[in-house]
Amino acid sequence: MSTDYSRALGARLRAIRNQQGLSLQGVEDKSHGRWKAVVVGSYERGDRAVTVQRLSELAVFYGVPVSELLPDPRPSSAVTSTNKIVLNLESLGSLPADEAGPLARYASTIQAQRHDYNGKVLSIRAEDLKSLAIIYDMSPDELTSRLIEWGVLSPGMESIVSSGGDEELDEDVDDSWGDRRRTPR
């Protein structure tokens, strides 16, 4: 097993354990010693190979499908990014409801939760793009292209969305787009 894959598998295992609110010792306690904290920790660090059988048993223990424990074999994309994407709500409002309705409802819900009704721009996490892509039945990259076509996403954002990058972001004004956007520093 490659080191990168072992680390990615370990990260998935750790993420599932954390979602369950369990520490390594908590896993050992909850499993009545079946899963030793030191062993699960070594799987999570990628220091120890896990067999398919053990991975299957761990999935049963966590109550998730085995596929949830496996890392995504595709290169990372916007769906794993923590960067924010800035949507132009004025452009969104001018689109036909049959095309942009799901995005408009999504944006409206976020605005209501944040009590943010400026009506010009809305920042969402790149992770939200994954949910929106499911709603639109397309990949995050396809949705990004569509948002740019619609004028909802700043033309400078495709590189940030596609990179899933770790670059720091800085707000500035792009007069050609008319509102704030986020660009790499």
Image (cartoon, grey):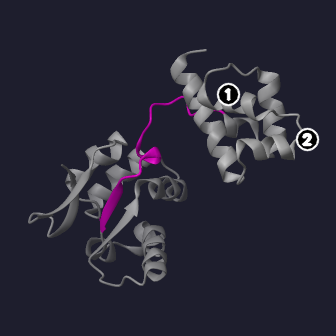
Q: Amino acid at mark 2?
A: His
Q: Which residue is mark 2?
A: 32
Neighbor class of circle 2 (other Cα within 10 Å; few <14, some 14-19, many 20+) is: few
Task: Please indicate whether residue 117 sits to the left or right of residue 137 in the image.
Answer: left
Q: Is residue 136 visible?
A: yes
Neighbor class of circle 1 (other Cα within 10 Å; few <14, some 14-19, many 20+) is: many
Task: Please indicate whether residue 119 sits to the left or right of residue 78 in the image.
Answer: left
Against 46, residue 131 (above or below) is below
- Per the picture, the main secondary structure of the magenta-coloured stretch is loop
Against 56, residue 137 (above or below) is below
Q: Is residue 64 visible?
A: no
Q: Nearer the viewer, mark 1 or mark 2?
A: 2
Which stretch appears magenta? 70-87
The circle drawn on residue 180 is: none
Picture coordinates of residue 1, whole percent (x, y) = 61, 14
Q: Residue furthest left?
A: 175
Picture coordinates of residue 153, whole percent (x, y) = 28, 60
Alpha carbons under labels 1 and 2: distance apart: 19 Å
Which secondary structure, mark 1? Answer: helix
Q: Which residue is mark 1?
A: 43
- Nearest to the observer: residue 142 or residue 78: 78
Picture coordinates of residue 58, whole percent (x, y) = 80, 35
Picture coordinates of residue 56, whole percent (x, y) = 81, 31
Which secondary structure, mark 2? Answer: loop
In which quarter of the view is residue 182 placed? bottom left
Q: Residue at x 82, y 40 (%)?
A: 28
Q: Earlier in the sequence, mark 1 or mark 2?
A: 2
Magenta segment: does it hold 76?
yes
Q: Amino acid at mark 1?
A: Tyr
Q: Residue at x 76, y 41 (%)?
A: 65
- Nearest to the observer: residue 136 or residue 127: 127
